[in-house]
Image (cartoon, rainbow, N blue to C red):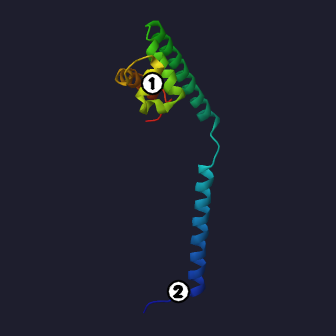
Amino acid sequence: MPQHVPLYLVLMLSSLALIASAIGIALVHALLRRPIPRQESDQRLKSQAMLDREWAALMQQIRQMGQDRLLVAIEAIRQDPTLLDDEARLAQILGLRRPASARFWKIKAEEILRKFGYIAW
């Protein structure tokens, strides 16, 4: 014959299960809201500093190569990312007569800016 479990025992076990899940949720919440440890923060700063150095070196290299239009395109798109969709305005900024001519400089500038995270993919 099957034995019956007393109702108070069932209620007590289910209450313990609820309390355990509430504690688990509280722990997960606390872990997600934890502050960034100093080591991770330092690594982010180092990687940002490295990116800044690479950016400065690339800009210097572009200047030395005499690619003034590329520099202008990079700075213009960096300040106003909507220029990626407006080749006519970019052509005016670059001093070009046709928007199709600005497309080349837009593509090069966009590639560089995406690599360094100045505009999102």
In the rendered image, residue 97, in percent from the top left (x then y), is placed at: 39, 18
Which quarter of the picture shows residue 107?
top left
Which labelled disc corresponds to residue 64? none
Q: Label 1 neighbourhood size at 10 Å, few (<14), some (14-19), many (20+)?
A: many
Depth order, front residue of 19/94? 94
Depth order, front residue of 114/25? 114
Which quarter of the picture shows residue 85?
top left
Q: Residue furthest front?
A: 97
Which label sits in the foreground, 2 or 1? 1
> Looking at the rendering, in which quadrant would you find the N terminus?
bottom left
In the rendered image, residue 57, in percent from the top left (x then y), is placed at: 50, 14
Which residue in the structure is indicated by mark 1?
Answer: 90
Q: Secondary structure at mark 2?
A: loop
**Is residue 106 at all visible to an observer of this figure?**
yes
Residue beneath the point at 61% across and 56% down? 27
In the rendered image, residue 13, in percent from the top left (x then y), is placed at: 57, 76
Query: Which of disc 1 and disc 2 is earlier in sequence?
Result: 2
Residue beneath the point at 51% across and 19% down? 55
In the rendered image, residue 93, in percent from the top left (x then y), is placed at: 48, 20
Residue beneath the point at 41% across and 26% down? 111
Which residue in the structure is indicated by mark 2?
Answer: 5
Q: Amino acid at mark 1?
A: Leu
Is 18 rendered above or below residue 84?
Answer: below
Is 62 rendered above or below residue 11?
Answer: above
Residue beneath the point at 52% across and 30% down? 80
Mark 2 touching mark 1, by CB under 8 A? no
**Is residue 115 at all visible to an observer of this figure?**
no
Q: Amino acid at mark 2?
A: Val
Q: Label 2 neighbourhood size at 10 Å, few (<14), some (14-19), many (20+)?
A: few
Q: Residue furthest bottom?
A: 1
Q: CA distance from mark 2 to mark 1?
A: 78 Å
Q: Secondary structure at mark 1?
A: helix
